[in-house]
Image (tube, rainbow, N blue to C red):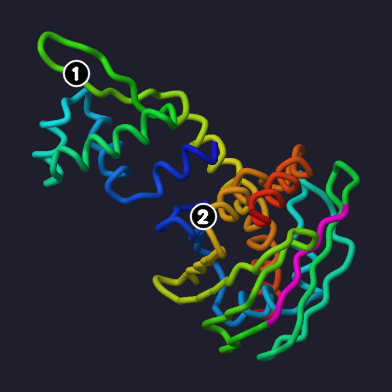
């Protein structure tokens, strides 16, 4: 079983890493083709996907929406800043409804030892925003967390 | 929780917390081991104390600083919850890419 690891770097960054038994080509397709993204992006225990669109080119927009088990609809959207097929993606990520600057996400894919290692790095505009995202974890109490975040970012 | 994160975001405070995992220590001891001067250490310890991460324990002639496990455990639990969210997502992605690989080989 490939393990998902997570670490915090500095005060604004979260790095999530995981190896997959697939080629970088296949993995790249699975993280960019919206029809495929719809099949994995919503964690089953959290909710179900509602819609998934992505125009994968520099300046193109994506939007992923899911209905959380609490009934609440949550959506992430952003713009692609860099698209290097099968190796690297840079895009912005907005948790819709949360004010402030978006996070910048860099995804890198590297084939090594018969696996593809995917590193997903999220850089948030501030330590407070990052920590609220971790805290919310898209679970119950998220509304509360978002209200707190709104207070924080408007300060 | 925000206080815990904020307190740990400063690299030297993080180093102090790491050091205190091996047991309670005095300001001087911490300063020597981390190559920080005493006022710096005291300042960082004050922030850590306000965040509830350390406690002071008077022992003989010295004041020893020790870690309080609870906020760190809470922090760990929070991180773990976020990690699990991604882990679940990636398990689903894993199933999908295996399926795609199989289809390609056919």
Q: Residue furthest top?
A: B60
Residue that badge 2 annotates: A127
Chain at numbered mark 1: B
Residue that badge 1 annotates: B63
Q: Residues within 10 Å of mark 2 (few under 14, many from 20)?
A: some
Q: Secondary structure at mark 2?
A: helix
Decide: is B6 above or below B48.
below
Which range is magenta?
A: A73-79
Decide: is B58 above or below A117.
above
Magenta segment main secondary structure: strand
Q: Which residue is painted at 82% across and 49% down in the image?
A: A47
Q: Position of residue B46 (x, y in %)?
A: 33, 32
Q: Is residue A127 left or right of residue B28?
A: right
Quadrant occupied by the C terminus of chain A: bottom right
Q: Nearer the viewer, mark 2 or mark 1?
A: 1
Marking on residue A22: none
Q: Is residue A30 magenta?
A: no
> On the image, which quarter does residue A78 sit in?
bottom right
Q: Position of residue B33 (x, y in %)?
A: 11, 40
Q: Position of residue B44 (x, y in %)?
A: 29, 39
Q: Which residue is painted at 47% across and 37% down in the image?
A: B4
Q: Residues within 10 Å of mark 1 (few under 14, many from 20)?
A: some
Q: Secondary structure at mark 1?
A: strand
């Amino acid at each position: 079983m490939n393990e998902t690891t997570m670490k915090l770097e500095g005060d604004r960054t979260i790095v999530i890493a995981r190896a997959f038994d697939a080629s970088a080509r296949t993995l790249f397709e699975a993280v960019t083709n919206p029809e495929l993204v719809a099949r994995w992006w919503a964690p089953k225990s959290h909710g179900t996907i509602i819609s998934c669109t992505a125009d994968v080119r520099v300046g193109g927009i994506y939007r992923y929406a899911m209905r959380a088990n609490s009934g609440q609809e949550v959506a992430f959207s952003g713009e692609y800043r860099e698209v290097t097929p099968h190796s690297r993606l840079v895009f912005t990520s907005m948790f819709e409804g949360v004010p402030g600057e978006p996070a910048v996400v860099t995804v890198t894919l590297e084939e090594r030892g018969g696996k593809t290692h995917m590193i997903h790095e999220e850089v948030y505009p501030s330590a407070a925003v990052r920590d609220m995202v971790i805290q919310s974890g898209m679970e119950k109490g998220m509304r509360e967390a978002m209200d707190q975040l709104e207070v924080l970012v408007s300060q | 929780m925000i206080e815990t994160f904020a307190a740990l975001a400063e690299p030297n405070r993080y180093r102090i917390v790491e050091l205190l995992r091996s047991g309670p220590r005095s300001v001087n001891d911490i300063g020597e081991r981390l190559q920080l001067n005493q006022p710096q250490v005291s300042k960082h310890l004050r922030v850590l104390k306000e965040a509830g991460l350390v406690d002071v324990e008077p022992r003989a002639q010295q004041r020893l600083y020790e870690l309080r496990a609870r906020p760190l455990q809470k922090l760990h639990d929070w991180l773990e919850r976020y990690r699990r969210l991604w882990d679940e997502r990636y398990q689903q992605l894993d199933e999908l890419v295996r399926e795609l690989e199989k289809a390609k080989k056919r």
